[in-house]
Amino acid sequence: MAIRNFRWEDIPAIADLESRLLQNEGNTASASQQSVQEHLGQPNLHVEEDLFLYEVNGSLGGLALVCLEPPIKRSVLILRIHPDHEAQGIEQALVQVALKRARELKASVLHVQVPQGSPWSKLLEEEGFNAVRVYWVMHWDVQGLPPIEVPEGFSFRTYGRAGDAETLTRIQNAAFGVSWGFSPNTPEEIAYRADMSMTSPQGIIFLSEGEAVSGYCWTLILDRGKWKVGVISMIGIDPAYRQRRLGKPLLKAGLEYLSSQGVGHVELEVDGENKPATRLYLSMGFKKVAERHWFEASLEAPSSPDTPSL
């Protein structure tokens, strides 16, 4: 058993691991090497230094990717364990490596998300993590949508004009700037993600008043073999347009687009404490089907007590 840094020739092994995890969840699709390369090639990642592979007899038993978000001094751990190697100490070894790397990167915290009831929860607590947030997983079964009028003077268009990456970046950062765990993005990062194979310009929908973009709905489509799954990735509204009831028209536009692409159902994740968002999704027919729990490890050394004066 050995832990080492990622090399680009490891992509086929990582795609095989992701495929096995998909199949373990009942999906018939396989993760492509292209999709793995796309994810690891994002401009905000430094995978040769921050992605660690755990090998067992020459095969990939698990991996840990530490994603640093410098604007908020946060790091996020993505952990993958091969089903054949669970409960063999790999999880603990990779978590410890991730904690060490996050400290080297001068992050203040390390966050990791696990499913509700995961056996990893106990391990994380033993390694100094605390549960800090609960996200809802919600599903919408493709069905008819209620009539929702677009406010007078507003219209929809799709992503793709010159300058749209900058516009989307500005609105996203403004809309989510005070949200828990959100780190501001750059136009380079947004343009890269908009060009990934699981999204399309038609799946990023802008709502505009005249030429001014007021909000957006960013959708994704995931291949699950026998069926496709639609995802509402983000809905963001420029703070200057809040209280104008634009959330429902944007959500409806996203659902209509995904329905037109033949998805089996639509899913999303939302912070359980975001009551306006959860009310919106419930009102449109989404149902809560699971929870995912965020854990946090503080990486800042505790301040030492003042030395008493003599």
Image (cartoon, rainbow, N blue to C red):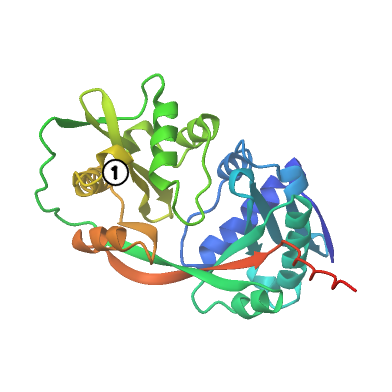
Query: Image height check: is 182 above or below 151?
Result: below
Q: Position of residue 56 (x, y in %)?
A: 80, 65
Which residue: 36% across, 44% down? 219
- Above-or-below relation of 291 to 277: below
Taking depth in this image into account, of 151 and 198 the one nearest to the observer is: 151
Observer-nearest of 198 and 193: 193
Question: Label 1 is placed on what type of residue?
Answer: Gln
Looking at this rendering, what residue extends furthest in the right direction? 310
* Left or right: residue 51 compared with residue 150: right
* Residue 154 figure quarter: top left
21 relative to 269 in the view: left or right: right
Q: Which residue is mark 1?
A: 261
- Residue 307 percent location from the top left of the image: 85, 70
Q: Nearer the viewer, residue 63 or 252?
A: 252
Number of marks: 1
**What residue is drawn where x is 63% and y is 80%?**
122
Position of the C terminus, as image quadrant, is bottom right
Q: Give how far across and how far down residue 72 sits, in percent.
A: 59, 48
Q: Taking the image as drawn, is residue 221 in sight?
A: yes
What residue lies at 73% left-to-right and 49% top-to-bottom?
50
Frontmost residue, 57 versus 128: 128
